[in-house]
Image: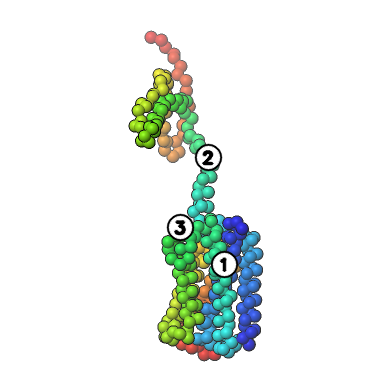
Amino acid sequence: MGDLEFWFIARITGLTAFAVLSLSVLSGEALRTSVLDFLAKNRAIRKLHDFTTPLWLPLVFAHIIALVLDKTARIQPVNVVVPFVTDYGQLQIGLGTVAFDIIMIVTITSWLRSRMNNTLWMWIHRTSYIGFVAIFFHAALSGTDFDAPLVSALAWSTAAGLAILGVSRVVWGRLPA
Amino acid sequence: MPAWALRVIAIVVTGLTMVGSTTYALAHPKNANAPLQPPVAEQADASVEPEPTPEATLPFRTLAPTVPPTPSPVPTTAAPSARATGLGTVARATASPTLAPTPRATATLRSTPVPQITLAAGVRTTQLPKITITHRS
């Protein structure tokens, strides 16, 4: 496999992972609001939220591994966990690293939730909003395909919808059905 | 809607996104407008020599041709060489640099550039008429 194949894999998995992570954040927000009450009960939405993890996890790892193996991209293994130390695009690539670190901590703490203090778990889980913001700006600032009209429209509208939901949840609490 | 239906929807959304992004990525292998370009690509572009820009034409025809100066030859020097002795130490370089005989620089005529006059807007250049000698004193 040459650099071009790794390049394609990185772009495809990056776009798909963004879509699935958006679904994960949406289903997580839906649990705390009532926006998807028309679609399903909270129990079903909770199962959807849990189900998205094995969907986005391999996509994110494939995205990172493809970039590390791509000699043109020049991503070192240390850049996967330590942000802002690449030799180019520190901010753009660093945001991706920060996002990866956050979502991995959120995921691992969710797997260990039964052994954790619930309040601590909740505050760690809320950092997933920060992680999603980092993912979005990582994609916007460094994504090769983000200037395509369709990709850009879908991504911005998804981010705007999630942001509105999140702010509504914070300001008004649980929204009426 | 039951949980399994939501899972199916999630799988369908994932699959459709993957197919769509694969189609798009294969159709657009390179994006020159990508916000982040790896430095290797930038160096490759920089290594390509830019096309020579055409010389700007002078607004006025110069009255005297300009001859480019001939470059004077540069004397060449031989680099000193060091030899290792039998004891393993490196001998000090004793060879003195030899200078190639320099050819005598020939005198070359160099014309000075014609002074350029910048005319105000609306002023045109005119050809001066020939001087006709009418009287001899």
Nearest the eye: A1 or B125: A1
Query: Which residue in the structure is indicated by mark 3?
Result: A88
Residue at the location (53% across, 49% down)? B44
- Total count of labels: 3
Residue at mark 3 to residue at mark 2: CA–CA distance? 30 Å
Report the amino acid beneath label 2. Answer: Pro
- Which residue carries the number 1 mark? A62
In screen coordinates, is A99 left or right of A38? Answer: left
The chain under label 1 reads A
> Three-letter amino acid code at disc 3?
Tyr
Measure the alpha-carbon separation of dots 3 and 1.
Answer: 22 Å
Residue at the spot x=48%, y=60% of the render?
A76
> At 36% across and 34% down in the image, what residue appears?
B87
Report the front residue among B33 and A19: A19
In this rendering, is residue B8 above or below B104?
A: below
Residue A91 showing in the rendered view: no
Image quarter where the C terminus of chain A lies is bottom right
Type of amino acid at the residue the image marks with label 1: Ala
**Place of residue B102 in the rendered image (x, y in percent of width and height, measured from the top left):** 40, 21
Contact check, label 3 and label 2, Cβ < 8 Å: no
The chain to which mark 3 is attached is A
Of badges 2 and 1, the one in the foreground is 1
Does residue A31 appear in the picture of this structure?
yes
Colour mode of the rendering: rainbow
Q: Residues within 10 Å of mark 3 (few under 14, many from 20)?
A: some
